[in-house]
Image (cartoon, helix red, strand yellow):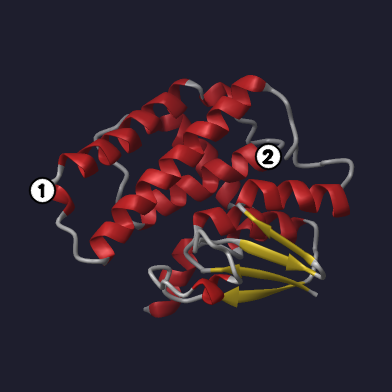
Amino acid sequence: MMMLYATPLSHYSRKVRILLDLWQLPYQFVDIGNVTNTDQDVFAGNPLMKVPVLVDGSQWIIDSDIIAQYLVEKYDPKDRYRVKELDWARLNIRAVMNGMMQEEVKLILAKRTGVPIDQYEFFHKSKQVLSQGLNWLETNASNFDSKNPGYLEFHLLCLWEHLDFFHFIDQSLDLPQLRFIYHELSQQPSIQKTSFHLLRRKKT
């Protein structure tokens, strides 16, 4: 059985988990625990000490997008969810969302390790990237297809819900199209299974 090394709150890992659930592929979820851990072995040998990591027999694969491509090659050659699409506008959107995810993780890990992020310009830029990124995504929302969602739309869902979970969405931003797309996607049972908000409800 495949093993996915991840954490329940990883938006990178959730992109992969959504695909695995949609394909109904069995896998073992290995919660690596604290992502600030500096033991490489905890991350299944990933020298970057990041998740997700997929182990499928003798195959060892890192990075959510590369893992998704591997899974498509092996289990879904028709690429039903357009993981390997070459629409450059949509690929630019994916790049923006991946960049926003990186900046959010930077803020979360800094706060988690006691860094006063409000005191440093370095982190102000990260916050600005999140706001500008959301505005840019709203402007380009016509490129999303909530009626026939694929990997790009799953990106948006994971990003949006993660930002919301950690209170990084500026409520003053006017984002009606993104909110609508998120609402449409979040209603799907196969996607709800990995909801970050579900984790919060389980704790209360």
- Location of residue 118 in the rendering, given as x and y in whole percent from the top left corner: 13, 49
Q: Nearer the viewer, residue 180 or 126?
A: 126
Q: Nearer the viewer, residue 42 or 101?
A: 42
Q: Indicate the secondary structure of the residue bearing disc 1.
A: helix
Mark 1 or 2, nearer chain start: 1
Identify which residue, 69 or 42, lies in the foreground. 42
- Regarding residue 175, the answer to whether it shows in the image is no
Q: Is residue 107 left or right of residue 67?
A: left
Viewer-proximal residue among 156 and 92: 92
Tag nearer the camera, 1 or 2 = 1
Q: What is the quadrant of the C terminus in the image? A: bottom left
Kind of residue indicated by mark 1: Gln
Measuring 29% from the left and 40% from the top, which residue is drawn there?
Answer: 126
Residue at the (69%, 23%) spot, across then down: 87
Does dot 2 land on a helix, a strand or a loop?
Answer: loop
Above or below, comparing residue 78 to residue 44 in the picture: above
Residue 149 is labelled as 2
- Please provide percent x and percent y for residue 161: 45, 51
Residue 127, image quadrant = top left
Q: Which mark is residue 119?
A: 1
Find residue 93 and report its horizontal and vertical position in percent.
54, 29
Is residue 22 found left or right of 89 in the rendered image?
right
Q: Residues within 10 Å of mark 2 (few under 14, many from 20)?
A: some
| Residue under the point 69% across and 40% down | 150
48 relative position to 82: left or right: left
Give neighbour class at mark 1: few <14, some 14-19, many 20+ (Cα, 10 Å). Answer: few
Callout 2 amino acid: Pro
